[in-house]
Image (tube, rainbow, N blue to C red):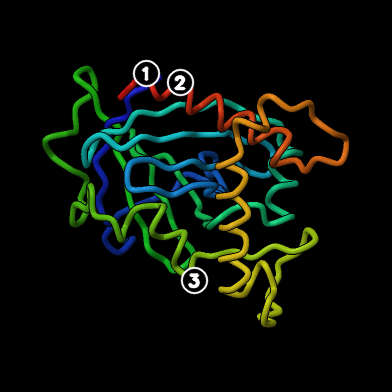
Amino acid sequence: MNTEKERRFLVKPLDGIVFIPDTRQDIIQMYLEDEETHSVRIRIINDSQAFFCYKKYIEADTKKEFEFPIDIDAALDILHTGEFLTILRKTRFKIDGWDVDKYNDNLIIAEFEFSDENPLPEILPEWIGEEVTGVYKYSNVALAQNSSNFINYKDGRNCDCLQPGCPYCDSDGAKKKLKEIEKLLDNKIELAVQPLKPEDSLWTSFWGMVWLGCKEIFKYER
């Protein structure tokens, strides 16, 4: 399991920054679980790659991370069926060792992953602004809960019907989805020991097993 150490900063007005088109990544992050101690997400990059990731929070700038690639079609299926808690999208560029993320509401955050061999530069680029490392409201988890960054999908299309009871637009629907996922997580042991049936959903048959595996791995890290 990897240890991720990073510092995060707001980006000043873009007069002094040049985005390199070849480094662009269009990212969608679906959060399956969001807790004080950890998060579970699926990331889709350029509609062509997908990754499952479990992050355990250690300190403001340090996380334990377990990540592996998954089938892109499975990830897109989860996206289009709405089997997630919250979701955000952002556009990422690479600039001189920095990951620069632009969100839908024009909020721009720069991240620098550091180590003993690759420390944070003593002199920061002129476009780097206030440090927001460990500030919750600027975390991806928090931004995924912000309506200006939220994407709703239904039947493979953007859903903006805003009809009462819609499981993708309405708050009651979001609560219903949360309860469904919580129930599946509570029953993960039963899912592990029972034979899978053809009618089982993608979440119960696959992600339930993945979640159980993550739980087994991370219980040794406490």
The residue at the point 69 percent across, 42 percent down is 203
Closest to the observer: 177 or 143? 177
Q: In this rendering, would 177 be left or right of 71?
A: left
Q: Are marks 1 and 2 in contact (CB under 8 Å)?
A: yes
Judge whether 169 appears above or below 189 on screen: below
Residue 172 in the image: above or below residue 114: below
Q: Amino acid at mark 1?
A: Tyr
Q: Position of residue 109 (x, y in %)?
A: 34, 53
Residue tagged 1: 220
Q: Which mark is residue 217?
A: 2
Dot in front, 2 or 3: 2
**Which amino acid, mark 3?**
Ser
Q: Earlier in the sequence, mark 2 or mark 3?
A: 3
Q: Which residue is mark 3?
A: 147
Mark count? 3
Label 2, secondary structure: give it. Answer: helix
The kind of residue on which mark 2 rests is Ile
Disc 3 is placed on an element classified as helix
